[in-house]
């Protein structure tokens, strides 16, 4: 299992919430950060989760695909994120 999803499951985050979180990340990463903070994950675990995402960004794509978000959606989100950065 993807380590991001495993950590979310460890904190009893439902499949529906996991999918919602990754969908939000694909549409608006800043909004997704707000959703993550509402999940009730202890700060030290949240910090571990963020470190995992920062050091292994490919895990986001793997997790998104495992919850049914297509590669096309992932690529559109990446392009949108890059455009927001410039």
Image (tube, rainbow, N blue to C red):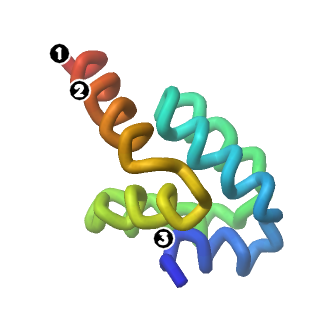
Q: Quadrant of the C terminus?
A: top left
- Whether residue 46 sits left or right of residue 10 in the image: it is left
Toward the left, the furthest residue is 86
Task: Judge the density around disc 2: few (<14), some (14-19), many (≥20) Cα neighbours within 10 Å.
Answer: few
Q: Are marks 2 and 1 in contact (CB under 8 Å)?
A: yes
The residue under the point 61% across, 79% down is 6
Q: Residue at x 24, y 17 (%)?
A: 83
Residue drawn where x is 50% and y is 28% of the image? 28
Task: Measure how far apart labels 2 and 1 are at the Cα level.
Answer: 7 Å
- How far from the left and from the top, in percent, is residue 18? 69, 57
- Identify the secondary structure beneath mark 2: helix
Position of the N terminus, as image quadrant, is bottom right
Residue 55 percent coordinates (x, y): 27, 65
Question: Which residue in the protein does label 1 denote?
Answer: 86
Above or below — where is 36 with respect to 80? below
10 Å crowding of disc 1: few (<14), some (14-19), many (20+):
few
Left or right of 23 in this view: 48: left
- Answer with mark 1 or mark 3, whichever residue precedes in sequence: 3
CB-based contact (under 8 Å), mark 2 and mark 3: no
Instruction: Tell me, for residue 82, which label it has, or none.
Output: 2
Of residues 53 and 43, which is closer to you in this image? Answer: 53
Q: Which mark is residue 48?
A: 3
Label 2 – label 3 distance at C-alpha? 25 Å
């Amino acid at each position: 299992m993807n380590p991001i999803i495993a950590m979310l499951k460890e904190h009893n985050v439902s499949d529906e919430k996991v999918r919602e979180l990754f969908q939000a990340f694909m549409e608006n990463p800043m909004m997704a950060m707000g959703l993550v903070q509402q999940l009730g994950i202890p700060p030290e675990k949240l910090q571990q989760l963020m470190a995992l995402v920062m050091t292994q960004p490919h895990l986001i794509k793997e997790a998104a695909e495992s919850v049914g978000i297509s590669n096309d959606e992932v690529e559109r989100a990446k392009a949108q994120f890059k455009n927001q950065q410039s």
